[in-house]
Amino acid sequence: MKQYLNAKWIGLVVLILFVIFWLIGVYWSSEPDTFSMETKVQEASTGFDHQSVAGYTMTTSLIEVTRTLLDKPGGYLSNDVMPPSIFLDNMPAWEYGALEMVRDLSRSMRNDFSRSQSQSIENSLLAKAHPKFNLDHRSWVFPPAESSYRDGIKLLEQYRQQLVDRSDADSQFYTRADNLREWLKQIEKRLGSYSQRLSASVGSSRINTDLAGAPNAKQSTPSADQRVVKTSWWKLDDNFYEARGATWALLHFLKAVEIEFADVLDDKNARVSIQQIIRELEATQQTVYSPMILNGGGFGMLANHSLVMANYISRANAALIELSELLNQG
């Protein structure tokens, strides 16, 4: 009887812990809501007109997106090694997608937005901040990823403060069409990759177009003329949430672009283009009511969430390419 009671109580404790971990996991897996970029910038710029300071809005958007990534429910989970975080995969995938967009923008701020031309000297603060965001997202000690990313935020805040200082001519941000186009080119490739990975959820035969239009070009190793591409069933939800995190971050960055580059967009008659991209990205953030990511095939009875996400991303990417071409026109 004593042994039965011991086994009974042990089983009860295990069940209670399982329920507690499950509830915590559900809460921590909730994605942060989108926020008003204009409101965030106004809160940060109390006492002066932020629109008169070039770069203030874009820098604030990078700071706020990264801070939300670290301070959302449960904090940063990708590098956790204890339960229940270690059993979660959707939110770490979401975090990685958002982090990739943070890395792309921080690189462009270092190499393009803060420099007037290719031969100009890079900003010392941005040169230090960019590597901080490139630390392995799963690093949990020496140093932990969160610590490195917070150091990057502090450097961005210092850079933002220097932009406000009229006596500091070394820290600059140039709202030029060519600078914006360089960043958009990076985003085009990123969204194109997500679209292809999501579309592969149902499997498809793809023709090799790697050397199309370049008859004299070479590649390192030969590849088949056609191959079947299909995402593993275990990776479907990871791909979906990574794309969802990336589009969440990009949505806020483009809202900042609409404010920061207003004169450039109006001059190129491109404001409506960026508004269309934002609308497509907002659609990617609609609530997923299914308890799991469904993978219905083609015109089958079940939904395919990956294909729906790929559709929105492809349309946003097409509009992004058109915007890039508009910016390239004189």
Image (spheres, grey):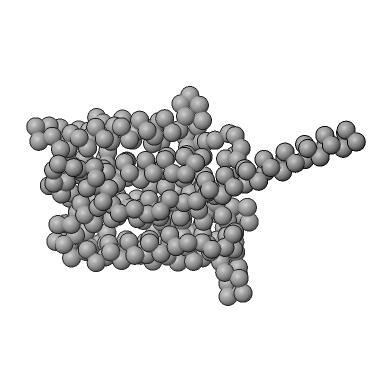
Which residue is pictured at 27% across the width and 48% down the height? 40
Residue 252 or 97: which is nearer the viewer? 252
Residue 57 rendering spot, x and y as whole percentages: 23, 47
**Residue at position x 27%, y 38% in the image:** 110
Q: Quadrant of the C terminus?
A: bottom left
Q: Quick check: 112 above or below 128? A: below
- Tell me: 104 left or right of 264: right
Tell me what residue is drawn at x 18 percent, y 42 percent.
46
Numbered disc total:
0
Residue displayed at 45% across by 33% down: 145
Residue 174 in the image: x percent, y percent?
A: 17, 45
- Specify whether residue 206 is in view: no
Residue 19's spot in the image, x, y percent? 65, 46
Tell me which corner region of the image, top left, top right, bottom left or bottom right, holds residue 189: bottom left
Judge from the rendering whether residue 45 lies leftward or rightward of residue 4; answer left or right.
left
222 left or right of 187 in image: right
Q: Is residue 230 left or right of residue 117?
A: right
Q: Is residue 55 above or below residue 308?
A: above
**Furthest-left residue in view?**
167
